[in-house]
Image (cartoon, rainbow, N blue to C red):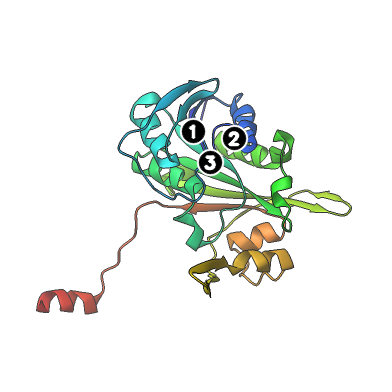
Amino acid sequence: MDEPRILLTNDDGIDSVGFRALYEGLSDRGEVTAVAPADDQSSVGRAVSQAVDVHDHELGYEVEGTPVDCVIAGLGTLCPDADLVVSGCNKGANIGAYVLGRSGTVSAAVEAAFFEVPAISVSLYIEADDDWEQLATATEDFRHATDATRYLVDHAGEVGVFEATDYLNVNVPYIETDTGFVEPSEMVVTHPSTRYEMGAERNGGQVDLQDGIWELMRSGSITDPVGTDRRAVAEGQISVSPLTAPHSTERHSALDRLADEY
């Protein structure tokens, strides 16, 4: 794809460091227009508004709404000629099939697919304990995510990747050890892990919802199969999952009989 027009959005907010890293990293790859939330919209999924306020921003447009609002407003009127939507870079991984529907970062890419515009969602997996928010605080910390995104922007379209998939969900590891930062080893094509570890615990008048996956990842107890997104990032690989947006359907003889007998 030569000099693409790129709509850049995210769910961490237009002033987040990961967003700035991608904006700077993609600006020499094409015409980049930011259409991103004014504040943090993490985990809002495909929530959509009836109307949103839009403000001029030094990078493009600041939207008082969700990532999906941004894509609709962007492709619908603010930059309707965009060739590609890039969403990210999210601080924190978006891995596993159960996460895709609740992630604002991924949902922006899904929304672009319904406009028939190819998209790439990009997230940074941070291997850390409870201090992960203190890591990846500078644009340089997102350099591997930026490099991977630049590479895919440069080549995915020209080799026909988006003829077979609607969007790419990219997760890049950020792994620090006592001896320094671990470089990603390679880029691999993956599929979302189906492992599910959500649970709930009654705590007086409330119920605490718990995601056991992150405890397993912090402990290194990853048994997901080779070829899954979670296994890849845990092993220091850049995960690229080619995905489609519309929900699939499959005819089933038992349901056909039920409908016929109604």
Quarter of the picture holding the C terminus: bottom left
Q: How many marks?
A: 3
Q: State which quadrant residue 162 falls in.
A: top left
Between residue 62 and residue 96, name the one nearer to us.
62
Q: Which residue was labeled with disc 1?
A: 36
* Residue occupying the far front of the picture: 205
Q: State whether residue 106 is above or below residue 78.
A: below
Q: Which residue was labeled with disc 2?
A: 19
Distance Cα–Cα, label 1 vs label 2: 9 Å
Circle 1/circle 2 CB separation < 8 Å? yes
Q: Nearer the viewer, mark 2 or mark 3?
A: 3
Distance Cα–Cα, label 2 vs label 3: 12 Å
Q: Position of residue 189 (x, y in %)?
A: 58, 55
Q: Which numbered circle lies on residue 40?
A: 3
Q: Position of residue 7 (x, y in %)?
A: 47, 31
Q: Earlier in the sequence, mark 1 or mark 2?
A: 2
Q: State which quadrant residue 225 falls in.
A: bottom right
Give the residue displayed 71% in from the left and 39% down from the top.
Answer: 137
Q: Earlier in the sequence, mark 2 or mark 3?
A: 2
- Near mark 3 (Cα within 10 A), the count class, few <14, some 14-19 or many ≥20, is some
Give the residue displayed 48% in from the left and 62% down from the top.
Answer: 98
Q: Position of residue 9 (x, y in %)?
A: 50, 35
Q: Amino acid at mark 3?
A: Asp
Q: Is residue 252 visible?
A: yes
